[in-house]
Image (cartoon, rainbow, N blue to C red):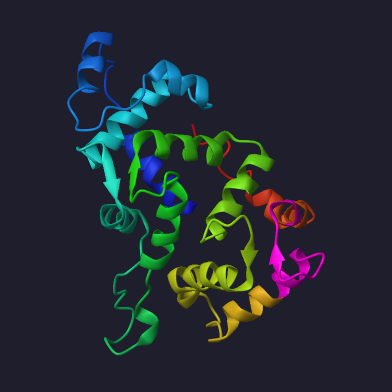
Amino acid sequence: MGAVMGTFSSLQTKQRRPSKDKIEDELEMTTVCHRPEGLEQLEAQTNFTKRELQVLYRGFKNECPSGVVNEEAFKQIYAQFFPHGGKQMNCCTNECPLCFSDASMYAHYLFNAFDTAQNGSVKFEDFVMALSILLRGTAHEKLRWTFNLYDINKDGYINKEEMTDIVKAIYDMMGKYTYPVLKEDAPRQHVEVFFQKMDKNKDGVVTLDEFIESCQEDDNIMRSLQLFENVM
């Protein structure tokens, strides 16, 4: 989620210039291979104003001239805004295992959550719909989106393996930079605690209702959902 916001902040910063008239705005919308839905339609489907959508679109087009982004390009864009992912920190020596972090796997799962059609590409509509939820959606909408991120195989349930894969990807991305250094089995221990809490009927999977109920009972999780409400 932080990476999404980093990307959004960059797009917003790049667009601080005088407004163009409507004719030029519409002309820009026709210059890419994929033409997104009309701004009026997206305005009705999201929590953004037409002007905010124009700013987001120009930024998206700047990063993705074709109008769509595949997973490899998504990972490259993600790496630009995550300061350590996949890069060497050079904090001490080249042999130090703590000098490396890998954000690529988390970016893979994040891309799958944005790719709602599961066709291997993310369009502007996919991007802005997800951003609308993450920035201005209700707590229930944000939790539903997060559930979809953890539901890797999209069968409507989260099993322990899926939760472990996501948590491990997060630890791979950030855990190596914590102090004191996390133990190797920290992701699995983390999952054991949370999965036991969420799997209320002990059937080996977490449903959407169980996920939302468990998150709503956790004050830290609910506070984290409010972090980006005033970004725009």
Q: Residue furthest front?
A: 155
Instruction: Estimate the x, y position of residue 194 in percent, counting from the top left.
Output: 71, 69
Q: Name the residue at 68% across, 42% down.
A: 140
> Is residue 15 visible to the viewer in this orientation of the structure?
no
Q: Please identify the quarter of the rendering in which residue 66 is found.
A: top left
Stretch in magenta = 193-210
Q: Name the residue at 74% across, 51% down.
A: 209
For the residue pair 108 and 171, the one nearer the viewer reads as 108
Q: Is residue 196 above or below residue 22?
A: below
For the residue pair 214 and 151, the one nearer the viewer reads as 151
Instruction: Estimate the x, y position of residue 19 in percent, counting from the top left.
Output: 29, 16
The reply, left or right, for residue 114 in relation to residue 55 is: right
Instruction: Estimate the x, y position of residue 88 in percent, counting from the top left.
Output: 29, 74
The reply, left or right, for residue 203 in relation to residue 166 is: right
Q: Is residue 153 above or below residue 122?
A: below
Query: Is 204 a magenta residue?
Result: yes
Q: Is residue 66 above or below residue 186?
A: above
Q: Please identify the quarter of the rendering in which residue 164 is found.
A: bottom right
> Is residue 160 visible to the viewer in this orientation of the structure?
yes
For the residue pair 171 and 6, the one nearer the viewer reads as 171
For the residue pair 163 and 55, the one nearer the viewer reads as 163
Q: Name the residue at 46% across, 77% down.
A: 176
Q: Please identify the quarter of the rendering in which residue 92 is found.
A: bottom left
Q: Name the residue at 50% across, 74% down.
A: 175
Q: Is residue 76 above or below residue 178?
A: above
Q: Residue furthest right?
A: 201
Q: Residue furthest left?
A: 31
